[in-house]
Amino acid sequence: MQQGDAMSPSEGFGKRPGIKRVGLMGGTFDPIHYGHLVTAEVARAKFRLDLVIFVPAGIPPHKRGVRISSRTDRYMMTVMATLTNPYFEVSRTELDRPGPSYAIDTVRHLKKEFDEETEIFFITGADAAIEILTWKDAKDLLKECGFIVATRPGCSTGELERRLMEARLHSTHCICMVEVPALAISSTDIRRRVEQGEPIRYLLPMNVENYVYKTGLYQKKCNNDKK
């Protein structure tokens, strides 16, 4: 499958046939790193996903007031990181939509690309999933798609499991957990390392690392929402 933006049927391309199970992976991706990529690949393999669509956030509601890199930089890094995996795509859905980026809007928009029988799974981390019932229109969202929740091996999941049990009361879809060993890597730590002159090699793809240094990201203040 060709790498690039996910296309909407409203653009005249019609629905994409033959895709039965799709994962949507949202995030700021500032920068995208191997933790994100391994999570997506583990979810793809374990849940037999035909496609994983990475969706960089436009205006993350949980990061209001926090400086983030431009939409262009985050989109470019996500495209470069996913380029070699034929099962990965990147969508500009949230980047091109005005206002805060909410999962319910994204899921409903991207579902239009596929047949009604296509199963949609939202891939997210444990920290976000534990607050799932506080998300915008959470009960409606739980009726729209399933959830794949990535956890770190060896970490306690008792509270998470309790919250997910509550969420399942409002859902007819799969809400499942999967262990991902690379989740110890974080974008926050990568940004800190760059700022302090520490190495980031092997934490993210080399082409993304080169992009970070070439553009001077994290070594200076970012322009929010630069187009």
Image: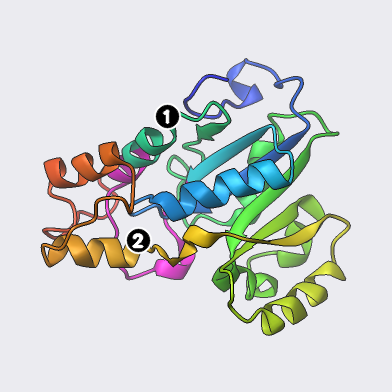
Camera sees residue 53: yes
Residue occupying image coordinates x 24% and y 45%: 209
Label 1 belongs to which residue? 83
Residue occupying image coordinates x 84% and y 55%: 173
Whether 146 is drawn above or below 191: the answer is: above
- Label 2 secondary element: helix
Classify the position of the C terminus by image quarter.
top left
Instruction: Out of 122 and 63, give the one closest to the viewer.
Output: 122
**Residue 225 located left or right of residue 217:** right
Instruction: Out of 177 and 134, give the one closest to the viewer.
Output: 177
Q: How many numbered discs?
A: 2
Q: How far from the left and from the top, in percent, is residue 7?
A: 57, 25
Q: Which residues are magenta?
A: 56-75
Label ID, residue 165: none
Q: How far from the left and from the top, in percent, is residue 50?
A: 69, 32
Label 2 crowd bin: few (<14), some (14–19), many (20+), radius 10 Å: some
Q: Is residue 42 magenta?
A: no
**Residue 36 located left or right of residue 113:** left
Q: Determine the image quadrant of residue 171.
A: bottom right
- Label 1 secondary element: loop
Whether 60 is drawn above or below 206: the answer is: below
Instruction: Out of 89 and 157, give the one closest to the viewer.
Output: 157
Camera sees residue 67: no
Query: The residue under label 1 is which amino acid type?
Result: Leu
Query: The residue under label 2 is which amino acid type?
Result: Ser
Q: How far from the left and from the top, in percent, is residue 179?
A: 63, 62
Label 2 belongs to which residue? 187
Residue occupying image coordinates x 89% and y 57%: 172
